[in-house]
Amino acid sequence: MSIRIGNAPCSWGVEFADDTRNPTWQHVLKECAEAGYKGIELGPVGFMPEDPDILREGLEENGLELIGGVVFRPYHDPDAWDEVLDATHRTARALKAHGAQHMVLIDSISPRRAPTAGRASEAEQMDHAEWTAYRDRIATSARIGAEEYGLTVGIHAHAAGFMDFEPELERLLDEVDEKILKICFDTGHHSYAGFDPVAFMKRHIDRISYMHFKDIDPKVKSRVIENRTGFYDACGQGIFCNLGEGDVDFPAVRQVLLDAGFQGWCTVEQDCDPTLNPDTLGDARKNREYLESIGFV
């Protein structure tokens, strides 16, 4: 099987580079390797060293390959464009320096959308002009990554942002050239949004270039949606459970990938709150072992 399994710093609670709660980047690399993975994502740019020589040494010490990186920024906010553009170029440079291929674009959490995470019918929508400008900012980032740096760029739907639910994701895919924008498909966020991950994969597998493996505890999902719980609080309540313990049908996900001849990396992401003392090493190991038990090797 030509699918390789990696992990990402968010599985160690790393969401923002400057968060004082973060473990060290050395600790993340060490535990990732100890859990049996051979690849890892960059995490938010600035978390790992941007000096290629320093990071290369750390990766080599742990037998890890850099897979890709995420631009998790407020594409929905026109006043934050300089920040988004800076993160785009810095992330792309870091990936290219280490031969990583996948740059993932995520619209970060918006206060306007946070209360309706998982509630597609209630979510505020952009008007035509706002959507057009938003779409064009995403397309610009994608074009930079694809054309200036030679990366494979994928859009990633994410709870509580403006690229969350299936209709807006499919609208974006219709309006942005497939040559510059593929899909990084996250199984867990698609379930959180209230849609069927396997059904979406079957419809769009030809455009999926990269996968994030995440599972959702259905009881926690139901509770946090009912209570309008914030995304990070939901993480602290354990909405992202170990793979195989939630509502994502990973054997079916595997079959769709196999049927399509998918090749390359699939990355485990189990967002957690580092202040709650999660068993990051144990969870990472369990997730790898689960994937191996259903045929991912």
Image (spheres, rainbow, N blue to C red):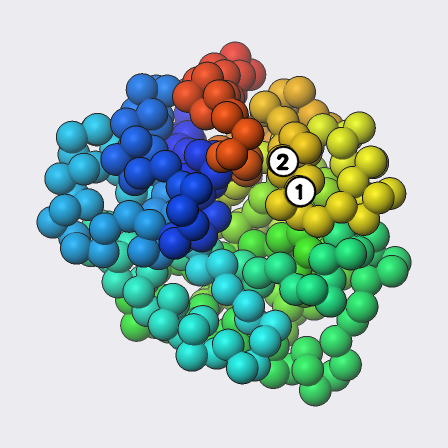
Query: In the picture, residue 153 is in which quadrant?
Result: bottom left
Residue 172, placed above or below residue 296: below
The amino acid sitting under disc 2 is: Gly
Residue 130, placed above or below residue 9: below
Residue sitting at 42 percent across and 25 percent down? 1
Instruction: Check whether the beta carbons of the residues at disc 1 and disc 2 lie within 8 A of each other.
Output: yes
Outermost bottom residue: 129
Residue sitting at 67 percent across and 47 percent down? 231
Residue sitting at 35 percent across and 56 percent down? 45
Residue 234 x %, y %: 68, 40
Q: How many marks?
A: 2
State which quarter of the image contains the C terminus: top left
Nearer to the camera, 46 or 161: 46
Nearer to the camera, 157 or 27: 27
Outermost top residue: 293
Element assignment for label 2: helix
Nearer to the camera, 290 or 29: 29
Element assignment for label 1: helix
Query: In the picture, residue 281 is in which quadrant?
Result: top left
Residue behind mark 1? 233
Question: Within 10 angstroms of label 1, few (less than 14), some, or many (20 or more) residues?
Answer: few
Mark identifier at residue 150: none
Residue 67 visible in the shown view: yes
Residue 271, placed above or below residue 53: above
Mark identifier at residue 236: 2
Residue sitting at 73 percent across and 62 percent down? 113
Query: In the picture, residue 32 is in which quadrant?
Result: top left
Q: State the separation of the CA atoms marked 1 and 2.
A: 5 Å
